[in-house]
């Protein structure tokens, strides 16, 4: 049996599809909103947070080269997040400007 899909107590799974459908109904371009969330979050999850955790955990035992590499990953993640966010915001502005 799959956990969460049994006939047991309601844990909110049954409300998720209607909420998502209602959200998609009122958001004009859901793909752009998902892209904005992805641009903000994915670079942090892929580059920034792992490098920060590595720097925190191994700051006393790792070499300077690894710390520099972690710093590079952090800068790369921040730059990717900023550039991706700018690109998505430009697309959102273009879509809504063409709608008016």
Image: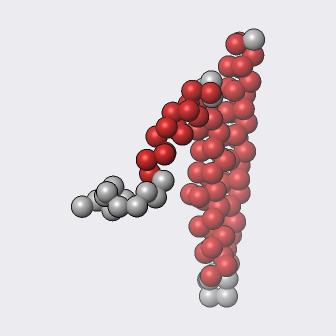
Residue visible at 69% across and 66% down in the picture: 71
Front residue of 85/97: it is 97
Q: Position of residue 44 (x, y in %)?
A: 64, 56
Front residue of 31/11: it is 11
What is the count of numbered marks?
Answer: 0
Front residue of 88/4: it is 4
The image quadrant that residue 34 belongs to is: top right
Could one spot residue 73 in this view of the protein? no
Q: Is residue 16 left or right of residue 43?
A: left
Front residue of 61/6: it is 6
Residue visible at 62% across and 24% down in the picture: 28
What quarter of the picture does the C terminus occupy? top right
Q: Position of residue 94 (x, y in %)?
A: 71, 20
Position above or below: 40 against 31: below
Residue visible at 69% across and 27% down in the picture: 92
Q: Position of residue 3 (x, y in %)?
A: 33, 62
Could one spot residue 8 in this view of the protein? yes
Position above or below: 1 against 100: below
Q: How is the image coloured?
A: secondary structure
Residue visible at 43% across and 47% down in the picture: 14
What quarter of the picture does the N terminus occupy? bottom left
The image quadrant that residue 87 belongs to is: top right
Single out the residue that lies furthest toward the bottom: 60
Position above or below: 76 against 25: below
Q: Is residue 86 left or right of residue 57?
A: right
């Amino acid at each position: 049996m799959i956990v969460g899909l049994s006939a047991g107590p309601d844990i909110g799974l049954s409300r998720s599809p209607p909420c998502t459908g209602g959200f998609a109904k009122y958001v004009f371009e859901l793909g752009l909103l998902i892209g904005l969330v992805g641009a903000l979050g994915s670079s942090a999850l892929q580059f920034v947070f792992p490098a920060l955790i590595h720097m925190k955990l191994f700051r006393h035992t790792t070499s300077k080269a690894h710390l520099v590499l972690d710093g590079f990953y952090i800068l790369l993640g921040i730059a990717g997040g900023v550039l991706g966010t700018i690109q998505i915001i430009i697309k959102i502005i273009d879509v809504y400007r063409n709608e008016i």
